[in-house]
């Protein structure tokens, strides 16, 4: 008999009434799920052929909590522990402070609230704080977060190009805030993926499989890394004495290739066209190789001045944008082929 999670049991199918097949359920499982006669149980027929049984109101009655004693943590590590709890998918976090030291720890709590989405302070006293998540994991599609990250990234790159063409440098004044927004969305995606992997009810509500959830996490990571390099470019432009670059020559011409390709790849999250995916990936690969050649020749031909160093660093970031966009396209191919996979059962 199966007495708890991880146990396995073999039960025989019974035929009752001549046409109805029944299977008895383990009593310990019934007790743990607090089920009573006539309660509803959801039956999912999985693609693998397995049946999955879930009490209908199981998700509504679950709350994940964690308590953190800040006084027992290493110095300045409360924020990291809070992020770990957030990414693990907890709903409520209770933080206890040592007497007289709450002000030191509250600054780390405020930093955590700035870096994440959905958590708010519900109860607060001199010795403790309780944080609760107000976002339902099933109500925020992963594609919405991915799209928001893409918009923040491309808007920053567009503003960088505008400044290089002579626009006001103030366009880049909020570059740090935009990068922080992308980081927060990455954490949100990672949290949702963790919850989806832990609960098939959440993955079903989000209309994604567990493999697809992991790949969406990879898409978000690629966008976040591209945003890091976009921020580096913005910082270079803001700190440079002269910011003019020829848009028709390397490396800037390859930034326009990246803009076209990443747009094409984003569209293919929905359309999944193999020809368009391959076209975008090949364009990015060609740009990446041409930028590498440009950098090698650039370094060999002269002693780098301050202006040369600016161009070289911009070139390096554009090359990285192309590389991470290629990774983005590879993940989309993985998603496409996984969804097209057919599983046959052998008669042997």
Image (cartoon, grey):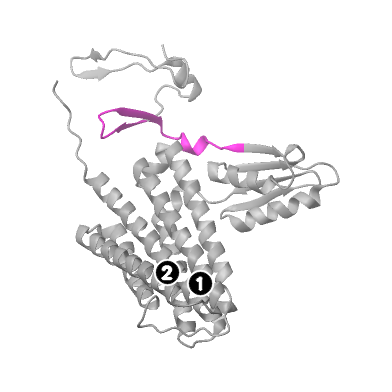
Name the spot of residue 153 as percent of width and height, x first: 45, 67
Please determine whether, in this image, residue 56 is positioned above or below residue 331: above
* Residue at 41%, 62% in the rendered image: 147
Identify the secondary structure beneath mark 1: helix
Q: Which residues are magenta?
A: 42-65
Residue 73 lies in the magenta-colored region = no
Q: Quadrant of the C terminus?
A: top left
Depth check: give the residue in front, 41 or 340.
340
Extreme left residue here? Answer: 347
Residue lying furthest right: 100
Circle 1 crowding by C-alpha within 10 Å: few under 14, some 14–19, many from 20? many
Q: Which mark is residue 198?
A: none
Mark 1 sits on what residue? 233
Quadrant containing the N terminus is top left
Q: Residue at x 24, y 64 (%)?
A: 279
Label 2 sits on residue: 318
């Amino acid at each position: 008999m199966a007495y708890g999670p991880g146990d396995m049991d073999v039960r025989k199918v019974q035929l009752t009434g001549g046409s109805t097949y029944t299977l008895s359920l383990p009593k310990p499982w019934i007790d743990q799920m607090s089920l009573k006669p006539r309660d509803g149980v959801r039956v999912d027929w999985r693609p693998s052929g397995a049946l999955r049984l879930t009490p209908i109101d199981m998700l509504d009655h679950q709350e994940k909590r964690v308590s953190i004693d800040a006084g027992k943590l290493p110095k300045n590590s409360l924020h990291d522990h809070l992020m770990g709890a957030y990414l693990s998918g907890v709903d409520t976090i209770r933080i206890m402070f040592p007497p007289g030291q709450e002000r030191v720890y509250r600054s780390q709590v405020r930093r955590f609230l700035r870096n994440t989405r959905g958590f708010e302070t519900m109860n607060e006293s001199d010795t403790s704080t309780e944080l609760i998540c107000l976002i339902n994991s099933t109500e925020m599609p992963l594609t919405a977060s991915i799209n928001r990250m893409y918009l923040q990234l491309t808007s920053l790159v567009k503003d960088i190009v505008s400044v290089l063409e002579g626009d006001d440098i103030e366009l880049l004044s909020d570059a740090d805030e935009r990068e922080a927004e992308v980081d927060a969305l990455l954490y949100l995606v990672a949290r949702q993926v963790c919850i989806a992997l832990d609960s098939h009810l959440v993955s079903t509500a989000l209309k994604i499989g567990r493999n697809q959830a992991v790949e969406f996490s990879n898409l978000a990571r690629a966008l976040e890394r591209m945003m890091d390099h976009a921020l580096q470019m913005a910082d270079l432009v803001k700190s440079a004495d002269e910011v003019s670059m020829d848009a028709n020559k390397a490396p800037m011409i390859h930034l326009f290739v990246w803009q076209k390709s990443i747009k094409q790849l984003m569209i293919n999250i929905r359309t999944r066209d193999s020809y368009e995916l391959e076209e975008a990936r090949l364009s990015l690969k060609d740009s990446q190789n041409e930028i590498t050649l440009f950098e090698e020749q650039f370094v060999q031909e002269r002693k780098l001045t301050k202006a040369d160093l600016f161009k070289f660093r911009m070139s390096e970031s554009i090359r990285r944008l192309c590389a991470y966009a290629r990774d983005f396209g590879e993940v989309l191919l993985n998603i496409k082929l996984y969804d097209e996979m057919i599983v046959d059962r052998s008669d042997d």
